[in-house]
């Protein structure tokens, strides 16, 4: 029961994070504030309480792993208030960015820090989805072309190969696929089903 509830809350965190992302005026607007907003959303919606200092230190570790540069003053000390931790994180984030600005944008760092912070939870149901990827997923759900279709890389349809997007509307299963049971559903001309055994 608790695991199920945890999964639902974790999924809600992802949705809230993704919904908060479109409110950014531009993609380059992500910075330390973006990471702090991610933390705030996590604290409000995660099933278990999370420590701001622990999460922000995990974000700093992920920045160091990504860039090879750590903050000059090290991790945020345990025992500081959340408000002080936010100030210290912003300072440390800006320090790292000042060193690597030629190689990474502030957005790259903010996304890496947010992802690392959420990965530190070791919860398979919680993770970071960059706003662009979230928007692409929403376009896919709405049936809009937003990517190169995965079926273009596959020369033949087989019963074992499946795609969430399904086959292109103008394709037909090969004879071997027909023999293995792949057939077009009668209710929808764009859906395919697996073996009929």
Image (cartoon, rainbow, N blue to C red):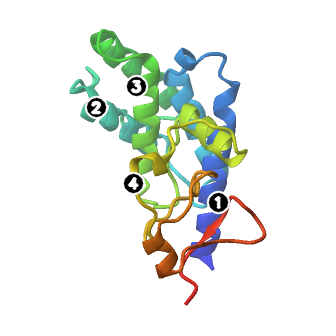
Of mark 1 and mark 2, the one earlier in the sequence is 1
The vertical placement of 111 against 107, above or below, is: below
Residue 2 visible somewhere in the drawing: yes
- SS at mark 3? helix
Which residue is labeled 3 in the image? 109
- SS at mark 1? helix
Apparent side of residue 2 relative to residue 68 in the rendered image (left or right): right
* Crowdedness near tag 2: few (<14), some (14–19) or many (≥20) residues, C-alpha within 10 Å: some
Residue at x 48% of width, y 51% of height? 151
Q: Quick one: quadrant of the C terminus?
A: bottom right
Of mark 3 and mark 2, the one earlier in the sequence is 2
> Mark 1 to mark 3: distance in Å?
26 Å
Query: Which disc number belongs to residue 9?
Result: 1
> Mark 4 to mark 1: distance in Å?
40 Å
Query: Which disc number belongs to residue 66?
Result: 2
Frontmost of labels 4 and 1 is 4
* Crowdedness near tag 3: few (<14), some (14–19) or many (≥20) residues, C-alpha within 10 Å: many
Which residue is labeled 4 in the image? 155
Of mark 4 and mark 2, the one earlier in the sequence is 2
Residue 70: image quadrant is top left
> Mark 4 to mark 3: distance in Å?
39 Å
The vertical placement of 23 against 81, above or below, is: above
The vertical placement of 46 against 193, above or below, is: above
Residue at the right extreme, as displayed? 187
Residue at x 52% of width, y 65% of height? 173
> Mark 1 to mark 2: distance in Å?
28 Å
Q: Are marks 3 and 2 in contact (CB under 8 Å)?
A: yes
> Mark 3 to mark 2: distance in Å?
8 Å
Residue at x 50% of width, y 20% of height? 31
Residue 78 visible somewhere in the drawing: no
Residue 25: image quadrant is top right
């Amino acid at each position: 029961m608790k695991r199920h509830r945890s999964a639902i809350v974790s999924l809600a965190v992802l949705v809230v994070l993704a919904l908060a992302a479109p409110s950014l005026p531009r993609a380059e607007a992500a910075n330390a504030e973006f990471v702090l907003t991610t933390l705030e959303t996590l604290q409000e919606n995660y099933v278990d309480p999370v420590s701001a200092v622990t999460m922000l230190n995990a974000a700093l570790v992920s920045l160091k792993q990504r860039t090879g540069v750590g903050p000059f003053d090290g991790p945020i000390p345990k025992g500081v208030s959340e408000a002080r931790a936010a100030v210290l994180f912003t300072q440390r984030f800006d320090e790292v960015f000042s060193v690597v600005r030629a190689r990474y944008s502030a957005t790259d760092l903010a996304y890496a820090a947010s992802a690392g912070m959420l990965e530190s939870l070791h919860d398979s149901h919680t993770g970071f989805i960059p706003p662009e990827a979230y928007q692409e997923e929403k376009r896919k759900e709405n049936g809009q072309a937003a990517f190169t279709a995965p079926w273009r890389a596959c020369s033949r349809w087989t019963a074992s190969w499946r795609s969430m997007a399904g086959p292109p509307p103008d394709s037909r299963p090969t004879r071997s696929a027909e023999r293995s049971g792949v057939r077009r559903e009668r209710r929808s001309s764009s859906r395919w089903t697996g073996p009929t055994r």
